[in-house]
Amino acid sequence: MKKRVRPLVILLVLLLTSVLFLSGCQKTEVAEPAGDQPAEEAAAAEPAEEAAEKVKVGVSIQGNQSTFWQFVVAGMGKYYSENPDLADVDLVFADDDAVKQITQVETLIQEGIDVLIFNPVDPVASRPALEACETAGVPVLVCTDDILPEDQYLRKVFVGSNHVAAGEMQIERVVETCGEDAKIAILIAPPGHSAQIGRSQGYANGLAKYPNIEVVVQDTANWSADEALQVVGNWLADGKEFDYIVCQSDVKMLGAIQAIEEAGMTGKILTSGIDGIDDALAAVKNGTADMTLFHHGEIHGYEILKIAIQVANGEDVDEFVFYPYGEATSDTIDEYLKVAADRKQLVEDYFDIF
């Protein structure tokens, strides 16, 4: 009897093992969607994909006192509000302190930014911040004011206006209003700043085209209306005579206008500036300024944030993205006053969004 039972037991064990093995195989096959399974059922069976991670954008701006930089930041805010799912933005102002800006950029890198939008306080002092980004593999986009030519390999993109073209446009305006034999004075930006370098090159190009224009005197007033008031006041007190003062920014032009008024020479000396700030537009409207070149900072901000996200996502972009100045003169001032009103509303709506 025992000899008959043992083969039967073995047979039962083998049968049970086969059933369990086949059952396990069937479970594995069921876990895979069948080839003819409806698409919606197959999709439900697959794990949901994770949402795309937002790009982390760091923004370092030289300061927020200038209305121009408020326009730039508001432009960024508008793009961000229209595309809230694309990026997180960490924006800091350096308060015109180059050392503070370097520290802020290093902190942004440590916080894990994917890309940096950078407006340098000082193009010379900005190198450590740029080198820190290079070491960390963080691409840099420079906004409005470029870095030094020898450092430009450290940035991916420049977004802004063509400073050389601005200088050329101002000289053309001198010829249009005062002729090719005009006598001019020039107020430049801080020496070495990209705006000063580019706009001065534009002046050189224009003067080469019109060699009979005489540059009577030239000096810097940095970015200060008070300094411009003092410099121009000294020129006039010293008996310098010129037909036109060409200024590399509106704030300098406003200081020059005040000096002209205090000397009792309003209407005898024309002026032009660059930026299209409200007070400069008002001066053109009331006839105390001849021209300001309207600088579309709001477009710079809007576009550079869009391009920064594209760069962080590995998309191909152009190295230079220029937006032309507009000539706000007595003939066009009403048009630019309307643009300025819209831009002011943009600041109210979007400047504080970050």
Image (cartoon, rainbow, N blue to C red):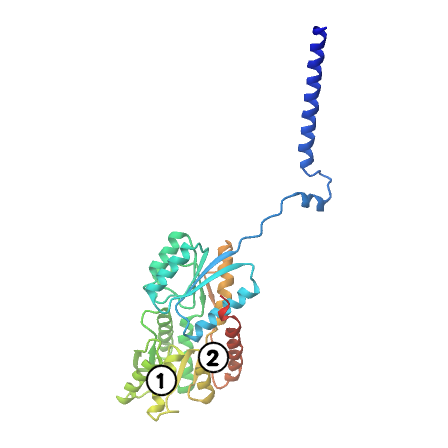
User: Disc 1 vs disc 2: which is toward the camera?
Assistant: 1
What is the quadrant of residue 85 in the picture?
bottom right
Residue 331 appears at what percent x and percent y? 50, 85
Residue ID at (40%, 52%): 136
Q: Is residue 39 above or below residue 169?
A: above
Question: Residue 327 got which mark?
Answer: 2
- For residue 87, side relative to residue 213 (left or right): right
Decide which of 35, 316 is in the foreground and name it.
Answer: 35
Q: Which residue is mark 1?
A: 256
Q: For the view shown, which residue lies furthest in the bottom direction? A: 264
- For residue 98, side relative to residue 73 (left or right): left
> Which amino acid lies under the numbered mark 2 shown in the image of this protein?
Glu
Residue 152 appears at what percent x and percent y? 38, 60
- For residue 5, side relative to residue 242 (left or right): right
What is the quadrant of residue 267 in the picture?
bottom left
Q: Secondary structure at mark 1?
A: helix
Q: Earlier in the sequence, mark 1 or mark 2?
A: 1
Residue ID at (46%, 89%): 286
